[in-house]
Amino acid sequence: MSDQVPLPAEFSLIARHFRPLAGPGALNLEDDAAVLALPAGRELVIAADAMVAGVHFLPDDPPGSIGRKLLRTNLSDLAAMGAAPLGYLMTTAFPQGTVDAWVAEFAAGLLLDQAEFGLHVLGGDTVSTPGPLTLSLTILGTCAPGRALRRHGARPGHQLWVSGSIGDGALGLRVLQGKLPPDPFLADRYRLPRPRLALGQALVGLASACMDVSDGLVQDLGHLCRASGCAATLRAAAVPLSAAAAAHPALLPLLLTGGDDYELLFAAPPEAAPAIRAAAQAAHVPVACVGGFAAGPPGVTVLGHDGAALALPKGGWSHF
């Protein structure tokens, strides 16, 4: 008879599904912590985000897309800082009775994006919960010393820019909820954010302030204004829309406030515009100048297509 002690269910699950995700520094997920050496001449950038079923994703979303969205939303935070990914820690609270096949598909989604974005899991924790599926990820990245992009550098006279297209995620959620007709493009944009890592790193030295858009363009622009101590004007007619979003002109307030865009929102002096466009072209990400900053109390004025101030029912998403 074997004298080996059988693995508890938790460790068996980790060995089957999460150990294949581990990279250098994770110590094969056999110890209490990871040991990681920073690349020479780089500073550590750390961010954390949590996702809860029914709040940040739909409970019946494919497990692989849930894992990928968890990783990508955190990678978007690195992009907003102009940082390069290094690794991540992950905590999973699976509802009691979660089947092994669900976890396998979740881990397979993570493995896909680890390969695409060049990082590995370093450790974390796995528990069960009587509540909804709850996931938390702490992302680690690096940047050159003192070069991380911040929110507080916008100044009067600076231009306001966004990457990609705005509003697709909010519309995608409504597609998946059955509130809009089926649209695979919009559904995919909700489920799979596009972290703009290459663009974020290229904006270092060009952008004066930067953040990603997660809670709605207008609300997140308000956060940037408060950090920078100035006002902003947003021109709705200049906000870049996909063809799918442009097909819903009556939903403009939703497009500007709905969230789940995970695009970059940044400020820059006007003279940086040619270099920004060149950097965006090299990163294969479109950018658009959508307004500007001015002296005044922190706040956002949205101008409609007619040039008049546009009243919005809310600025964006809030958990409280």
Image (spheres, rainbow, N blue to C red):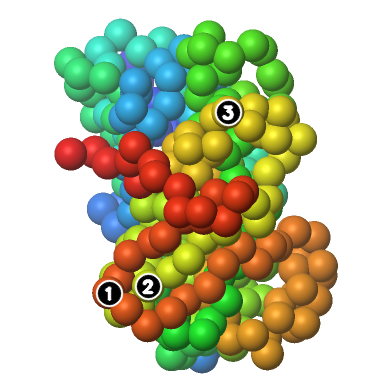
Q: Which mark is residue 297?
A: 1
Q: Which residue is mark 2?
A: 231
Q: Residue at x 37, y 73 (%)?
A: 231
Q: Is residue 90 above or below residue 287?
A: above
Q: Secondary structure at mark 2?
A: strand
Taking the image as drawn, is residue 67 in sight? no
Q: Earlier in the sequence, mark 1 or mark 3?
A: 3
What type is the residue that disc 3 sits on?
A: Ala
Residue contact between numbered discs 2 and 3, judged by CB atoms under 8 Å:
no
Quarter of the image where the C terminus is located: top left
Q: Secondary structure at mark 3?
A: helix
Q: Secondary structure at mark 1?
A: loop
Local crowd size for mark 1, using a 10 Å CA cut-off: few (<14), some (14–19), many (≥20): few
What type is the residue that disc 2 sits on?
A: Ala
Residue 99: horizontal and vertical position, in percent?
41, 10
Q: Residue at x 45, y 48 (%)?
A: 310
Quarter of the image where the N terminus is located: top left
What type is the residue that disc 1 sits on?
A: Pro
Residue 277: horizontal and vertical position, in percent?
76, 73
C-alpha span from label 2 to label 1: 6 Å
Q: Which mark is residue 20?
A: none
Q: Residue at x 55, y 37 (%)?
A: 252
Give the side of residue 274 with respect to residue 142, left or right. Answer: right
C-alpha span from label 2 to label 3: 27 Å
Q: Nearer the viewer, residue 223 or 122?
A: 223
Local crowd size for mark 2, using a 10 Å CA cut-off: few (<14), some (14–19), many (≥20): many
Q: Which mark is residue 250?
A: 3
Q: Nearer the viewer, residue 107 or 222?
A: 222
Residue contact between numbered discs 2 and 1, judged by CB atoms under 8 Å:
yes
